[in-house]
Image (cartoon, helix red, strand yellow):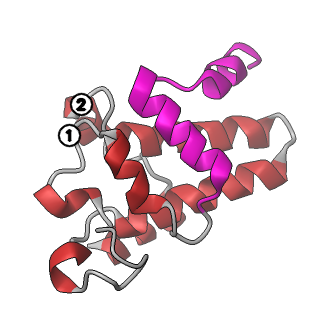
Amino acid sequence: MAFFFTTVVMNVGYPKGFEREIELSGERSFLRFAADVCELSDLQKSLGDKNRAKRFREAAEYMLGVSDHNYEHNNKNMWDGGHFIGLGHDGDMSRDMTLDDVKCFECVYAVGQSTLELLEEFINTGRMKQLEGLRGNK
């Protein structure tokens, strides 16, 4: 499934095609977070910050790529030395995330400190100030 999500993001442009799943998901779900990061990337690109836009888009792609896998059962040490990776461990990326879920992405390629901070902010508040600020600048 990870290959499917990564392909969707790179070729079609997530969240296109997943609108219904996002609409039905929890307010602080991974699906909503990924859609918001993609929107953040698009807004940054439209404002001329192409490097930052590219970094956030890559982070979203790689997060989506691992988010539907359950490595806890398959190989606990496969990615990051012991943390399970993937919000799909319960088979549902539409559930609200908790701060424990941030650990899932700490060692994912292209996911840096700023993306992890956005994830924590999103889990705590259900929003991202950076995204809201850019929406106001459109």
Within 10 Å of disc 1 (Cα), the crowding (few <14, some 14-19, many 20+) is some
User: Residue 70 occupies which quadrant of the picture?
Assistant: bottom left
Q: Can residue 94 be seen by looking at this rendering?
A: yes
Q: Can residue 126 be seen by looking at this rendering?
A: no
Query: Where is residue 68 shown, x and y percent of the image?
Result: 26, 64
Query: Where is residue 103 shown, x and y percent of the image?
Result: 41, 57
Residue farthest front in this picture: 82
Residue 10, magenta (yes or no): no
Task: Name the residue that disc number 2 marks.
Answer: 26
User: What residue is shown at x 45% (from left), y 51% (from top)?
Assistant: 14
Q: Give the range drawn in magenta.
A: 111-138
Circles 1 and 2 in contact, beta carbons < 8 Å: yes
User: What residue is shown at x 71% (from left), y 23% (from top)?
Assistant: 134
Query: Where is residue 125 shown, x and y percent of the image?
Result: 44, 21
Work out whether residue 70 or residue 61 is closer to the camera in this orientation and state it. 70
Q: How many marks?
A: 2
Identified by mark 1, the residue type is Arg
Query: Where is residue 64 shown, x and y percent of the image?
Result: 41, 61
Q: Is residue 90 left or right of residue 136?
A: left
User: What residue is shown at x 60% (from left), y 48% (from top)?
Assistant: 115
Give the numbered dot on residue 95: 1
Work out whether residue 51 or residue 102 is closer to the camera in this orientation and state it. 102
